[in-house]
Image: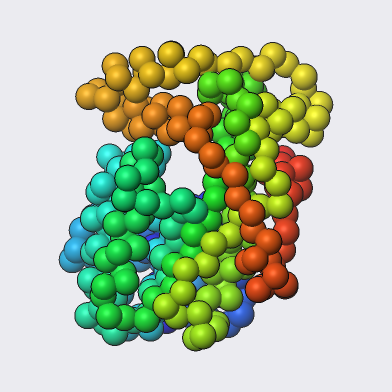
Amino acid sequence: MIVVAGGTGTLGTRLVPRLAGAGVAVRVLTRDPARAQHLTGHGVEVVRGDVRDPASVTAALRGAGMVISAVHGFAGPGGGSPATVDRAGNANLIGAATRAGANFILVSVAGAAPDHPIGLFRAKYAAEDMLRASGIGWTIVRATAFMQTWATIMSRMQEASGKIVVFGRGDNPVNFVSAADVAALVDRAVTDPGLRGQVLEIGGPDNLTFNQVAALLQESTGRHGTVRHIARPALQMMAWTTAAIKPALARQARAALAMDTLDMTFDSTSTRRAFPGLPTTDMPSAIKELLA
């Protein structure tokens, strides 16, 4: 039995059917079972639980041979945050997996570090540290920013207002990877015991600026509206003024500033050579999938 926490998200939605299609028994841990209706059947069990609740995590992991954590608290649904979900929630998952004697695959972020300016990256690094010290079999999969996440955010703005919003100047190259490519690598980690104790990093084929992503969206949709930039000082003000009343919005503003200024490029050549069968999805293909 494989338990997938975060099975209804961008990655989980692509990973769970892949695992179940191979004949593996999968249990999805989710706060809202209604969000997992499209995953039910074909060997997929859905259980209600919250990674922030140790009791529900322990119950969900009963009988598990492997746990996959694809959770994140960046956007803050249900009051979640990187501290409560990516750090504390993963601590609950790792603790329960240790008691169950299960192997563990943690989906983290490329560039995770204890001093990273983005809180999500710091929380993911803390989870990695806890996993390494747990004594159970582990694999860490570090991925760059998901194409589907950012293309969805920008396309929804385009649909709502006719404008694509770009945070900051939008000229800083960022590596984006398809969640489908990450799902394929996680699947490989599930089936290959030789990958225990390893950190696998995956990115997409291109480093793109947000201005380039906006242009690709316009080309794919045929809607060539205005691209509106939110200046860096406005993002700084947003992060400062909303910290107490809308912490999720403040986190997103701080992350947008970081992505507009830090080196977010990535070269996935070594991983692609090590796993030659992995798909290599580009941004236009990911956008086409979303629009379909």
For the N terminus, which image quadrant?
bottom left
Horizontal side of 106 relative to 207 (left or right) equals: left
* Residue ID at (63%, 66%): 271
The part of the image, by quadrant, that contains residue 87 is bottom left
Colour basis: rainbow
**Image x and y of residue 43, in percent:** 51, 77
Name the residue furthest left: 55
- Number of dots carrying numbers: 0
Q: Position of residue 276 (x, y in %)?
A: 72, 72
Residue 138 falls left or right of residue 150: left
The quarter of the rendered structure image containing the C terminus is top right
The answer to whether 146 is drawn above or below residue 102 in the figure is above
Give the answer, above or below, for where 103 lies relative to 14.
Answer: below
Q: Residue at x 27, y 80 (%)?
A: 135
Residue 161 as seen in the image, left or right of residue 219: left
Q: Is residue 160 visible?
A: no
Seen at 61% across and 80% down, the residue is: 22
Q: Nearer the viewer, residue 157 or 135?
A: 135
Q: Is residue 219 above or below residue 128?
A: above
Place of residue 82 in the rendered image (x, y in percent of width and height, measured from the top left): 31, 46
Determine the image quadrant of residue 223.
top right
Taking depth in this image into account, of 8 and 266 the one nearest to the observer is: 266
Tell me the residue at 34%/27% (across/down). 250
Whole-percent x, y for residue 36 in the image: 47, 57
Q: Is residue 254 visible?
A: yes
Left or right placement of residue 157 versus residue 272 in this view: left
The quadrant in which residue 210 appears is top right
